[in-house]
Image (tube, rainbow, N blue to C red):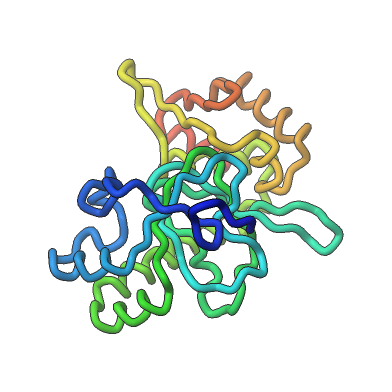
């Protein structure tokens, strides 16, 4: 990763007022439920980084694994490629979520982490976090819980998703996305803003772009969604959305 002027290892320091005490995610970030002394201990090892602009790389495949990262604001895609160059996108991550955690137990990152929009992160040096986990069991439990959530999503998306049609595969993705970053507007509409492109979604779901386009058109014709360029509006309630998955 190219080094920027005034930064080390291509990472840039966050403005000084973007610390844990002023973070907009005080109840969502890891360690939020710990007591003040434990929180202060964790905060002392966190390195604030950003902003990364859309397209900038936070870490690259084959970089030595040293840290995991919590997204303070913005969004990130994790991507790699097959030996023949076929692109893969393993997932999309948003505020309060961890990236780099899939490299735990390895010596190098196996993917690139790329900002999808202006993104601020907190870098957590893994050797120090690992040491703190032995001192603070609650922190260890929280990180293991996050790993469990990641595995459950992988199971749903890959193991179950491969048996679904393109439109149902997208609905599985959309439901997960809504649970993580959905929005209810003032007039009661349920929407999901898409920081990623539809092309990125197609790659993530293992679909051709034209297959995803047909799936979106079908779902819109069925009255399940309203498809916009960078936003999906979910029509009907959550139960109706989930019922569509298994029709």
Image point 80% across, 53% down: which residue?
Answer: 86
The quarter of the rendered structure image containing the C terminus is top right
Residue 210 located left or right of residue 97: right
Q: Is residue 122 above or below residue 110?
A: above
Residue 88 located left or right of residue 105: right
- Percent of width and height locating residue 232: 53, 27
Residue at the far top: name it.
Answer: 187
Image point 51% across, 45% down: which residue?
Answer: 52
Q: Is residue 114 above or below residue 238?
A: below
- Percent of width and height locating residue 199: 70, 37
Residue 174 located left or right of residue 199: left
Residue 134 located left or right of residue 108: left
The quarter of the rendered structure image containing the N terminus is bottom right
Q: Is residue 192 above or below residue 9?
A: above
Image point 66% across, 48% down: which residue?
Answer: 204
- Percent of width and height locating residue 6: 49, 53
Q: Quadrant of residue 145?
A: bottom left
Image point 66% across, 52% down: which residue?
Answer: 89
* Residue 247 appears in the figure: no
Q: In this orientation, which residue lies closer to the viewer: 162 or 122? A: 122
């Amino acid at each position: 990763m190219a080094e920027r002027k005034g930064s080390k290892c291509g990472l840039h320091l966050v403005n000084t007022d973007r610390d844990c005490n002023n973070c907009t995610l005080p109840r969502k970030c890891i360690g939020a439920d710990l007591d003040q002394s434990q929180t202060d201990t964790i905060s002392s090892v966190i390195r604030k980084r950003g902003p990364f602009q859309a397209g900038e790389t936070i870490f690259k495949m084959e970089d030595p694994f040293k840290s995991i990262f919590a997204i303070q604001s913005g969004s990130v895609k994790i991507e790699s490629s097959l030996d023949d160059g076929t692109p893969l996108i393993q997932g999309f991550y948003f505020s309060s979520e961890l990236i780099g955690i899939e490299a735990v137990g390895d010596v190098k990152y196996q993917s690139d982490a790329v900002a999808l929009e202006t993104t601020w992160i907190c870098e957590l040096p893994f050797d120090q976090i690992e040491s703190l986990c032995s001192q603070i069991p609650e922190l260890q439990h929280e990180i293991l819980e996050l790993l469990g959530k990641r595995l459950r999503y992988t199971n749903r998306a890959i193991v179950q998703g491969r048996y679904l049609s393109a439109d149902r595969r997208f609905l599985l993705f959309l439901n997960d996305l809504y649970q993580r970053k959905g929005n209810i507007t003032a007039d009661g509409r349920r929407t999901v803003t898409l920081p990623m492109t539809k092309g990125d979604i197609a790659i993530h779901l293992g679909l051709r772009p034209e297959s995803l386009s047909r799936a979106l058109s079908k779902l819109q014709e069925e009255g399940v969604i309203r498809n916009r360029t960078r936003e999906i509006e979910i029509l009907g309630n959550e139960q109706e959305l989930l019922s569509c998955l298994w029709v």
